[in-house]
Image (tube, rainbow, N blue to C red):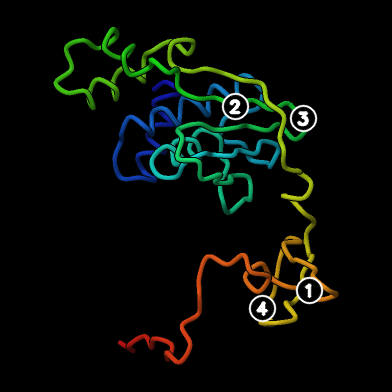
Amino acid sequence: MSELERLLQISIAQHDHLCPRQVLGVRMGMYAADLLHVPYQQKDKRLHTFVETDGCFADGISAATGCTLGHRTLRLMDFGKVAATFVDTQTEQVVRIRPSLDSRQQAAVYVPEARSRWHRQLEAYQVMPLEDLFDVQTVTLTVSMQALISRPGIRVNCNVCGEEILNEREVVHEGLTLCRACAGHSYYRVNEGVYPLQAEMA
């Protein structure tokens, strides 16, 4: 079994099937690891990855690199793009990789007899040369890796809601320590006067 096949099997196990975007994610993660000279499925936290969309693609990236939300080495930048930026925290090298703009058209060259466009991409993305499949850019981050990683054991409580805040994500405003929700940057709104749902006991 090739390394690609092995990593695709890991992605399949995580996602219950194999699709073209998973293949892109696995091959992109492998390519980044090769470019930055880091191992596949890292065991430490040297490599950090910013994925620009979620779903199958992100699962492929994770299978190849070992970057996960749980290890705080995978971060979603929700741009809706099948692209990712890879950061080697030891060398401070940063590369962004995206599929070539004509990768779908190129797939027809490699698998012309596929029974559908989906199957053509699934098969072609596994065999296309990297230079036909991907574009690589060297980039500079506009966010601070040190701030994103933070320091272990840092905890404060919001002066408004009282909830604990980890990883230095608090906002200080007019002398108050606030969570981002209480500072006005919330993605939810609490429904006043509505009792919490109760889970039925089995």
Under tag 3, what secondary structure?
loop
Q: Give the CA separation, mark 3 to mark 4.
A: 34 Å
Q: Residues within 10 Å of mark 4 (few under 14, many from 20)?
A: few
Looking at the rendered structure, which numbered label has been put on residue 38? none
Residue farthest to the right? 175
Residue identified by numbered label 3? 92
User: Residue at horizontal 21%, vertical 23%?
Assistant: 117
| Quadrant in the picture for the N terminus | top left
In the displayed structure, 124 sits above or below 192; it is above
How far is disc 1 from disc 4 in space, using C-alphas?
11 Å
User: 10 Å neighbourhood of mark 3: few (<14), some, or many (≥20)?
Assistant: some
Q: Earlier in the sequence, mark 3 or mark 4?
A: 3
- Residue, far left: 115
Tag 4: residue type? Glu
| Numbered disc in front, either 3 or 4 | 4
Residue 177 as seen in the image, left or right of residue 136: right
Report the mark closest to the observer, 1 or 4.
1
Question: Could you say which disc has been placed on residue 163 in the image?
Answer: 4
Give the SS element for disc 4: loop
Alpha carbon distance from label 2 to label 1 = 35 Å
The answer to whether residue 187 is left or right of residue 202 is right
Return the residue at label 2.
Answer: 96
